[in-house]
Structure formats: C-alpha cells, structure tokens
Amino acid sequence: MRGLPVFLLPLIATGALQAAERGPWTEVQPDAIRSHVEFLAADLLEGRATASRGHDIAAAYVASQFRQAGLQPGGDDKSYLQRVPLLEATPVLPGSSAELVRDDDTYTFEYGTHYLPNADFSSASSTLSAPMMFAGFGIDAPELGYNDFENIDVKGRIAVIFSGAPAKFSNEKRAYYSWEERKLSTLVERGAVGVITIDSNADIKRTPWERRVAMSWIPQMRWLDESGQPQNAFPALKLRFRFNHDAATQLFEKAQSNFHAALAASEEGMPQGFELPGMMTLSATTGLRKTESANVVGLLPGADPQLKNEYLVISAHLDHLGRGTAVNGDAVYNGAHDNAVGVGVMLEIARAFHASNAKPRRSIIFVAVTAEEKGLLGSDFFARQAEQQEKKVVANLNVDMPLTFAPVFDFVALGAPHSTLGAAARQAVAAQGYRLSADAAPEQVKFIRSDQFSFIRRGIPALVLSAGYQPRNPSVDLDELRRQFLSTHYHQPSDDLMLPIDYPTAADLARVDLRIALTVANAPAAPRWVNGDFFAEKFHTVK
C-alpha cells in the first residue's frame, strides 16, 4: 500500500483523537436542558410544591422523559412513580404562644417578632411548661474533647441551644455536628422535653430573621413508615421553637452569663451550659393532614452479569416551594435554578446514555426526588427503601442548584475529598477542559444540606457538581451574581426564567457528570471512602 499524502496525516490524527474521545457526553445538547428548564420553571406548574398538582404534572413530565430515554420503570407497580406517604403539618399562628415567668415578672413573646414555632407532628394542640437549661451548641463530640453537657442536666427541661457548630471545628466535623437531627437525637437521649433554637451569627448571615418569618407559611412534612408513624419527628421533644436574638436576650436575664457573652464564647469554641432562670410555657396549634407525593425512578440496567446488581444513583430534586406570599406581585416560587436546572441536567444525562447506546457495567438509577425542600424526605425515603430491598447502592451523584450563571473555567465537586469519587471528578473535569476548585464557602456546610446526605448517612459515597468561581469573561462578576442570588432570589418568586442561566455551561456540567458516571459504572471496584474519613467513621461504613 502506498503511503498517504503528508497533508492528510494531521487530519487523520485529529479524527482518531475525536473518535477515541467519543462517548455519551458528545450527545449532550444545551437546548435540550433549556427545554426542560423552561417547562419545569413555568408558571403553569405553580412552583412544583410537594404533593401539589404542579408537582404531579412535573413528575408525569419526568416519567415521560425517562420512558423516551429508554429507562425501565423503577417505581411502584411497574411504573416510574414511587409513592412517598407524607404527614403535612402547618403551624396555626393564632394558636401559638410563648411566655416566661421569672420571679414575679411575666414576659410574653410575640409570634414573628420574637419566635417561630415548629409544627408538632404528634398532636394538633400542645402546651409545654418547663424550666430551661442553656446547652451551648447542643453538641457532645468526645473525639474533639468538646461537650456542652458536661456540667448540666437537661432532663425534664427545655434545652436552649445555638444553631450550627464552633468555627474551630474542621469543615466535615462542623457539618456533621450542625446537623439538626444529630442535635435533637442528643437532646432526646439526655431527657430534654423541648428545645428553643437560637440562630448563630453565621446562620443569621445566611438566613436573616426577616426571611425566616417571611417563609414561615411553608408547611412542614415528614414521611410515614408502614405503620403510619412520621419519621424523625422526635415526639419526646414535645415542642420546638426558634427565638431571635432580641428574645434570647430576655431568656438570659439574671443567668450566670448574658446572651451576647454566651454566644461569643460558644462561637469561640468554648463548651458551656448553665441554668436559665424562670419557667417557660410554649403552646402550639398545628393543622395535620396525610398526603403523598412521588419520586420518579428510572433504571438503566447494567451489562455485566455480576456488577449489574450494584447501583449508581443519579439524583436531582423535583420539588420547590409552590405558591406563597406574593413578592412584588408574584406569588409563584418557580425554582428555576433550584432545581429545574438540576433536573434538566439529569434528564439530559439519561437521554445521552440512550442516544449513545452506552452499556455501563453497573446499573444506573435516575431519580427525581420529591420533598427535598421539606428536609430531604424523598431521597431519605428512596434510600431507605433501597436498603430494605437490599439493593447495593455504591455511589450517588446529586445535581442540585448548580448555579450556571455564566461560562466558567472551573467546577466544584462537593464531597471530592471524602472518597475515590474525587479522583473520578478530577479526571472528568480535566477531560472536559475545566479545572476543579475547592468549595469556597465550607462554613455553609452544604455537604449535609441536599439529597446526597440521605446517601452519605447510609455509608454511600456521594458527589455534587456545581459551577465554579472563575468566569471566562473577566467583566462578569460571578461572586456578585452568586451573592445576589442567595440574598435576593433564593427561595423567592424571582428565582425564575428571567435570571441568567448559561445552558452551554449546564451542558458541560452534564458531560462531566456523565464521565464520572461511566467511570463509576465501569470500574472493577466500587467507590470507597478515603481511609480515616470522618463521615465514613461516623456512619460505620469502612468495610
């Protein structure tokens, strides 16, 4: 055979490189993501509130997309829908009160001005009178030599605690010990009968009191087990209230330390606890109703005879806040970035797998979960059902609010330092022509604040990919865009299609997740936690 002309050699080399690089990620289309987002964030769906008609429409849409992408039904009764039974609890504002009697004085606190009640999932009407005990952050962390309960007894008392955890804790430890369920479990174990939570300065900065009051119309929920009991409702803590700093100042009157000194000491990492004088009476009235919503579940079966019984879960939450208090005349909380973009990315990953005819060795489950905004309920229910069915879930890739405002040079892979998924993420990001950046705001403990935590707490490594911090256009102030979103648009009606969404960046994020998914699905060994990882040890997962 005669040699090829020299001028053709570079073209052949380029073609060979492109052929070697072909994979499902080459099928991703930005406009497909845009189409999903524009439907899911439309006013027609009225904000996709859990257990609402709008959410049902969104779930039917996702199910139809799963079918079109060739996924097998993974829900109940050979459908795509996994029913999640729920108990909805709505505080009835005129039925709540908080009153402190100390010496011969009575202090009456006002709803919204001073306190917000949590819903009571056990009773429509509750009253609790008990003395109070301050317990710092409400943390007992023996491995850190930190114990707010060392010199106090909260048995039979209303525990008064700060949200969050000491800033001196490392990121993962601060995340774990900030976890509300961990705190409430500790209080129940120690015999507390109620709890008053006061926001730390860091939490006030993230969620000002005025925003908490403005969002207090949102019903609370818990999922119900087979016997109809609400999960993680902590009935032993008869009432749970949140007080602001003005009211907290009054609680600490005549105590061994005033409120501001106690807060400063806790935030400096000093364990502390002491009695707060007086008798507190809390009352709450709650509207209770049983309802249900649905996760949408699709299965891409694995091609390997053995590994097909192991599962990678790719998740994104479908719900948002629904209709609520109008802001500038708009009462629909559309949730475009939170999380229509995430669902759009997940759907395009599923379609790209189908279009490329990829045959991963492990099985991949795609799930659009409900009730994330209610406390990760849909993902918790899904993960628990998988446990009961003895499905071996080996990893979770979650897509939540990736904030693709503009083209960037970098992505962030939340959870990368904790498991071998980090190496897969670094390779995938580089292969797509990006850099991997560390989380710039670890104090926000985002690792426990989305659906990946439902898997992490069951010992399953997880990863969440989002846009980074380095804009390709130097005139774009990404820090300001992110700050403005979180302060002005997050959980507001203005998180809609009028905000900037860069779909090519969302498409590249989908491509990176696809590369990670294929690496996980085809690797001989399942992902594993890094040796000595804090979360692995806490959740007893080192195997």
Image (cartoon, rainbow, N blue to C red):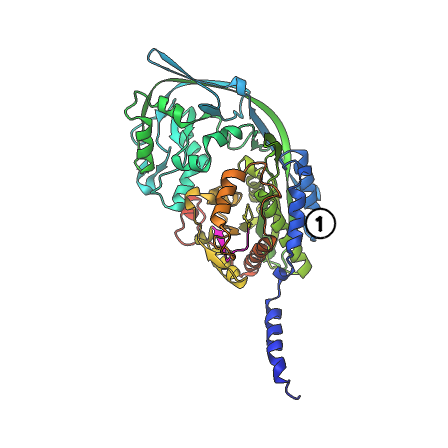
Q: Is residue 518 visible?
A: yes
Q: Where 4 sits versus 352, above or below?
A: below
Residue 392: horizontal and vertical position, in percent? Answer: 56, 50
Residue 18: horizontal and vertical position, in percent? Answer: 61, 69
Is residue 108 left or right of 369 when viewed as pictured?
left
In the image shown, does 350 or 27 lie closer to the viewer?
A: 27
Name the image quarter holding the N terminus: bottom right
Residue tagged 1: 67
For the residue carrying disc 1, how many other residues have a C-alpha within 10 Å: few (<14), some (14-19), or many (20+)? some
Q: Where 360 sits versus 64, above or below?
A: below
Is residue 329 left or right of 256 when viewed as pictured?
right
Residue 412 within the segment the image draws in magenta: yes
Residue 256: horizontal and vertical position, in percent? Answer: 27, 24
Q: Is residue 300 visible?
A: no
Q: Where 122 sits versus 64, above or below?
A: above
In the image shown, does 473 or 59 lie closer to the viewer?
A: 473
**Which residue is most to the bottom?**
2
Question: Residue 225 occupies which quadrant of the picture?
Answer: top right
Secondary structure state at the residue bearing disc 1:
helix
**Which residue is most to the top?**
104
| Residue shown at 45% from the left, 25% from the top | 241
| Residue shown at 31% from the left, 27% from the top | 152
Residue 281 within the segment the image draws in magenta: no
In the image shown, does 360 or 166 lie closer to the viewer?
A: 166
Question: Residue 19 occupies which quadrant of the picture?
Answer: bottom right
Question: Residue 157 occupies which quadrant of the picture?
Answer: top left
Image: magenta residue range: 406-414
Kind of residue at badge 1 = Arg
Is residue 255 left or right of 204 when viewed as pictured?
left
How many callouts does the rendering have?
1
Q: Where 224 sits versus 452, above or below?
A: above
